[in-house]
Image (tube, helix red, strand yellow):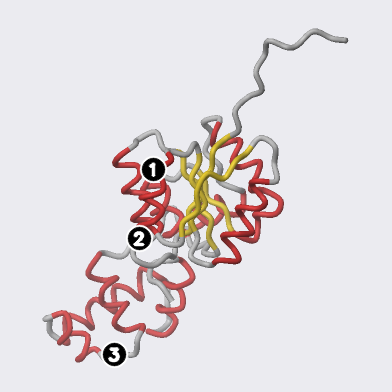
Amino acid sequence: MSPPSDTAAPKPIRVLVADDHPLMREGIAAAVDAHAGLEVVATAADGREALEEFLRHRPDICLIDLQMPLMSGLEAISAIRSLVSTARIIVLTTYKGDVQIARAIQAGASGYLLKSMLRTSLIDAIFKVHGGAVEIPLEVAQTLATYAVSDTLSAREIEVLRFVAIGNSNKLVGAALNITEETVKAHMSTILSKLGANDRTHAVTIAIRRGIIEP
């Protein structure tokens, strides 16, 4: 009979899962819990709940969806990182636009995974980020690199494009933003140039694809 070991088993990595879709949230939690080295300590259905559960449990890793009600994933990431600068967060999303990726990283995310990658990459990403690495898959990194030198839209240009995206004319956009119709036209001209778009519809399509505005 071998003597008892003095070496305690390593503690599992404690994980928070935040996603507003119940089936996705439960599926991710089940996949994480199925690994012997991981433990889901909390789940959340929106950004505000994610922040609350983080403060309650102080998990080692947070898995956070970007698009959630009450408080977005980006807002939750910023709030968590402002409270605990060492918090390690991995974004899980269906959006692969470069602007969304850049915003998440700027907010403090240490990893960015598309949900289509979860089956093959999630567990490995958790261990890497827990170990201090930044996990940006090649596909995501290539998207960032593609637009690295492109001009960014100003806050006002994004406002104009959001109103255009829901079908407003230049006159209505101007009225909503308290600017002249000519100013709206000037903004649209700059937007088309920066995005390399042919027309308003094309500009909106590009902006949604890149994550500049939400669909």
User: Amino acid under label 1?
Assistant: Arg
The kind of residue tagged 2 is Asp
Query: In which quadrant of the rendered image does the N terminus lie?
Result: top right
Image coords of residue 80 (percent x, y) = 35, 45
Q: Picture coordinates of residue 205 (x, y %)?
A: 46, 78
Which label sits in the foreground, 1 or 3? 1
Task: Return the mark for residue 159.
Answer: none
Q: Amino acid at mark 3?
A: Asn
Front label number (3 vs 2): 3
Query: Dot 1, crowdedness within 10 Å: few (<14), some or many (≥20)?
Result: few
Frontmost residue, 206 versus 9: 9
Task: Identify which residue is drawn at 34% across, 35% down.
Answer: 85
Mark 2 or mark 1: which is in front? 1
Q: Position of residue 179 (x, y in %)?
A: 12, 81
Badge 1 marks a residue whose secondary structure is helix
Determine which residue is flagged by label 2: 151
Query: In which quarter of the view is residue 8 placed?
Result: top right
The quarter of the displayed image where residue 22 is located: bottom right
In the picture shown, does residue 163 fall above or below 136?
A: below
**Of 207 and 119, which appears nearest the observer?**
119
Would you name the residue on which mark 1 appears?
56
- How far apart are the two marked residues, 2 and 1, measured between alpha carbons? 41 Å
Indicate which disc, 2 or 1, sits on the residue closer to the N terminus: 1
Apparent side of residue 69 relative to residue 181 in the rendered image (left or right): right
Q: Which residue is mark 3?
A: 168
Where is 209 relative to 151, above or below? below
Residue for point 69% across, 41% down: 35
